[in-house]
Amino acid sequence: MKSNGVNRTLQAARTQELIYELKVQQAMTTKVITVEPENTMEDLRQILKLHQLSGTPVMNEGDLVGIVSVEDLIRSLLEGNGSEPVKQRMSANFVTLYADEPLVHAVQKFERHGFGRFPVIDRKTKELVGILTKGDIIRCMLQRLEIDFHEQEIRRYKPSDWFAELESDRTTLGLRYLIQGRNFQRAGEASSKLKQNLRTLGIAPEAVRRITIASYEAEMNLVIFTGGGELSAFVEPGKVTITVVDHGPGIPDIERAMQPGYSTAPDWVRELGFGAGMGLPNIKNCSNELKLDSKVGEGTNLQFTVFT
Amino acid sequence: MTLREIIETLQAKVVLDNHDERMVVERARASDLMSDVLTRVNPGALLLTGLTTPQSIYTAEMADVTVVCYVRGKRPQEETLRLAEERGLVLLSTDLPMYESCGRLYKKGLKGGTET
């Protein structure tokens, strides 16, 4: 579907669809804080405060026996009875949800019973597996809508579409990143940005992975061995070409540098997790074409292409 | 294996909690050498490492790793933590050394990167 305006009716339909698609277990909170029937209302007060809860299930030796809320606590405190046990105040007539029920059942139950929360149990074992509040439902739906929206955005920017719309004999999109030598705090940042951009452009994840693993290795080489340089990505229909240029010191023996395990890196580089002689071999493995020129004292020019 | 089981098996502390603990992790990789990690990609894998620099996160990002566990009680550097947070990764820290961390997970059936 291609649409630039927000279509309200469609959006509403999507949220309705979602409450049928999503299951209670996807929205519920799994870290359930519980109390025991013999705990005092004062214990309950502290537990609710500590965990910032508005209510909690009551468990007796592994069995769910009731549910107690902040309203029950207020009523108890108003009557000045903080030392009475939770079992005096809890609701033993509670309603549960099954973890595999669609969210729409939960929404209906919230409307019907007016409770603030439902304990969630496993349909087979009948064990308590979570708790569901209205807040949980809203959070889960919003997250899901955000994911949907993001996927739609990506589809809208699919480069094959707008590449086709731009008339030329050869259309190329260029992304250029400046790499600082010896700056380890930022080593990897360029490839990280490149990865996000390639994803936004809708390039297949497998190809994005190969391109950015290779560019990351190349970026690390620039940071480790050179005073810095430039990493550029040229995106065209069907392929991405990366060029990496620096101004020295250059590679004396390219053939050996391409051998897995061959490294000239000092120990401090290994302590940073690199310099094991796998950089160039990794780049080669990830790319469909590779060209490496280097002159000692002048610099290195690496170019590789990944078909997308 | 679920994230919950991994945390329990490694007696790990959750440094950054970005995912549901019921999330399933199917494979694990372990290395202090980032280039070794990058020789093979297992999307959604767990990475066990002793390297706590920002490159542990960049490597995880390039290899589409979703959970990083630091071994031998190491804690990530501040910049590392920030990067991981931005990328929505889960960070764990276990006091166990590398070999024992791997051994425990493997015994419980968590596969390595090359197994079928």
Image (cartoon, rainbow, N blue to C red):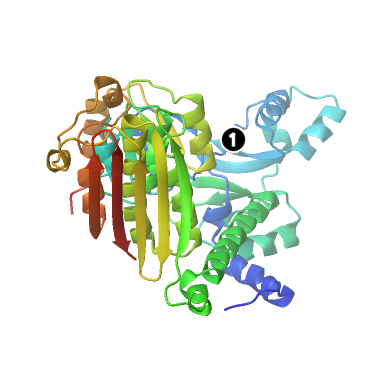
Residue at x-position 53% and y-position 55% = A26
**Near-viewer residue (A129 or B23):** B23
**Near-viewer residue (A285 or A244):** A244
From the viewer's perspective, is A142 left or right of A265?
right
Question: Which percent across, then down, holds residue A190?
Answer: 45, 43
Question: Which percent across, then down, holds residue A28?
Answer: 57, 50
- Residue furthest to the right in view is A78
Residue at x-position 19% and y-position 49% = B114
State the quadrant of the C terminus of chain A.
bottom left
The type of residue carrying mark 1 is Thr
**Near-viewer residue (B38 or A97):** B38
Residue at x-position 73% and y-position 73% = A8
From the viewer's perspective, is A111 left or right of B3?
right
Q: Would you say residue B25 is visible in this rendering? A: no
**Near-viewer residue (B37 or A295):** A295
Question: Which percent across, then down, holds residue A181?
Answer: 40, 31
Question: Which percent across, then down, holds residue A222?
Answer: 35, 36
Quick check: A175 above or below B74?
Answer: below
Quick check: B105 above or below A9?
Answer: above
From the viewer's perspective, is A100 left or right of A228?
right
* Tag 1 residue: A34
Instruction: Estimate how packed mark 1 is, as few (under 14), some (14 to 19) or many (20 or more) residues with alpha carbons within 10 Å.
Output: some
From the viewer's perspective, is A197 left or right of B2?
right
Q: Output the chain of dot 1.
A: A
Quick check: A293 above or below A23?
Answer: above
Residue at x-position 72% and y-position 23% = A42
Quarter of the rendering containing residue A5: bottom right
Q: Would you say residue A281 is visible in this rendering? A: yes
